[in-house]
Image (cartoon, grey):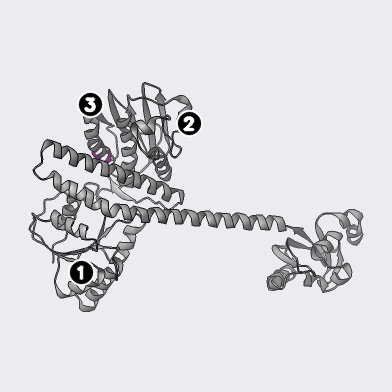
Amino acid sequence: MDRQVLLDHEWVATVPVGIFRLDHQGQCLYVNEKWRELSGMSAERALGEGWRRAFHPDDQPRFAQAWRALVGEERSFGGKYRLRRPDGAIAWVYASANPLTGEEGERIGYVGTITDITDLHHQQIEQETARIRAEQANIAKSECLANMSHEIRTPMNVVLGMAELLQESELSSQQRLFVDTMQHSGKLLLNVINDILDFSRMEAGQLSLNEEPFSPHRVVEETAAMMRIPAQQKGLALEVALADNLPECILGDPNRLGQILVNLLGNAVKFTEQGGITVRLAPRDGQQGVLCFSVIDTGIGIEPERQQRIFAPFVQADGGINQRFGGTGLGLTISQMLVRLMGGTIWLESRYGEGSAFYFTVPVREAVRSREPCAPDETPRQQRPLHILLAEDVDENRLLFEAYLAHTPHRVVMVTDGEEAVARSERECFDVVFMDVQMPRLDGYAASRAIRRREREKGQRPVPIIALSAHAFEGERERSLAAGCDSFLSKPISKRMLLEAIRHVPWPP
């Protein structure tokens, strides 16, 4: 059948797709009814060169480029374009065209189609707008929570620090009970804040994992040692079982791995009244390079109908759990998110009234110990008096810092903003600078950059700068390092944390 006859056929004229036929010079010979409907252009106006004017002026250059490629390279083209109707309305279409050849293989023209995708285009725009708004809402929520955390962590740094100092003083048994209770409650509050922040960052996809060499059995043993204290207070035994064939050193995030174990062991201690808890670590059977962690308790167990929802956010084992045991109901949700982020899986087995067992796997890569040592440097360092500069705008934090160092050989100079820190460090030689990052006039980041710039210009030895922050934004550590700081401490800062940071200050050359 002749191609022109085919195009004039009744079914071609009435199909719900716009069809056009061009000669070998690109002159329009035919448009069907749907093409005329979409373009708002009559057949008489479309013939010849007229059909090109149906495309939106802003799309004309892109369309002309595609058309030249079709003619010059003898290949089909397709793309998303706008048609501008005479009444000003815009229709979005997908336009495509293909060469037509005669019986001898010669080019005799082109045939193309336009498909109305206006509704689909608007749906895509709406979906993209909704996605952007959701991302912006998540970011705004995370920033709001991080700012709230900063406002809470700043006074909590003082509350917990003062409680720690009181524990070192002469107290009656009743006073010691009060102080211990105050510090324990403060730490519970911080756990709640950290859970909410972690959950918010994970929802927004803003939480990332570090990769460093560490010993997996050391993480298990240290976490168990920490959780053994609250277990013993309830009369519970907490045992550790480590397989013999564990890798000595792996690459991963030991802090986040420890967080998962703390969540699981914390729940085990919380929901176990008698018996004991066992934490196990062994290679996963039949899976190369996969470790399996287990936390098994003899606690209250979980009802079968609730086991399917136990990893959902804000879900407790039963309706009365929150009133009886407390907690945000986010620990298992965060643990599941972290395990998935590590590429593993987490599951549970439980019999109501008899106990629960939580398991999770983590794929690991062994680290080369000669280049990436796992064991911390425990070489004793001789303590020497340091000349310390503290830049901190909160009076109570300066008082706490001074009290922490009251019985040490160190001398402390205190300033209240970044400008003072830069000026004082230029007049005096300090062994280390503790720089709060949130200060008036000049913040800690800008002050650190100014100090580093002056050192480079004058050829001075770089002074160690340790950033202090009550902010919980992901990447705060990286931001401080980029500003020239050597390390980072997150508030609340205990006396032990501070003295440990001072202990690792390098000796001058």
SS under mark 1: loop
Which residue appears at 59% of the width and 56% of the height?
Answer: 128
> Gap in Å between the C-alphas at discs 3 and 2?
31 Å
Q: Residues within 10 Å of mark 1 (few under 14, many from 20)?
A: some
Residue in the foreground of this view, choosing between 379 and 429: 429
Q: What amino acid does circle 3 point to?
A: Gly
Q: Position of residue 14 (x, y in %)?
A: 87, 55
Quadrant for the C terminus, please: bottom left
What residue did someone put label 2 on? 308
Left or right: 233 in relation to 310 = left
SS under mark 2: loop
What residue did someone put label 3 on? 235
Residue ranking furthest to the bottom: 457
- First in sequence, mark 1 or 2: give its number: 2
- Whether the magenta-drawn stretch holds residue 70 is answered as no
Quadrant position of residue 365: top left
Magenta segment: 217-222
Residue in the foreground of this view, choosing between 40 and 258: 40
> Gap in Å between the C-alphas at discs 1 and 2?
56 Å
- Which of discs 1 and 2 lies nearer the camera? The answer is 2
Q: What amino acid does circle 1 point to?
A: Pro
Assess whether mark 2 and mark 3 are in contact (beta carbons under 8 angstroms). no
Left or right: 51 in relation to 434 = right
- Which of discs 3 and 2 lies nearer the camera? The answer is 3
Q: Is the residue 263 above or below the residue 236 in the image?
A: below
Q: Position of residue 331 (x, y in %)?
A: 37, 39
What residue did someone put label 1 on? 462
Residue in the foreground of this view, choosing between 253 and 2: 253
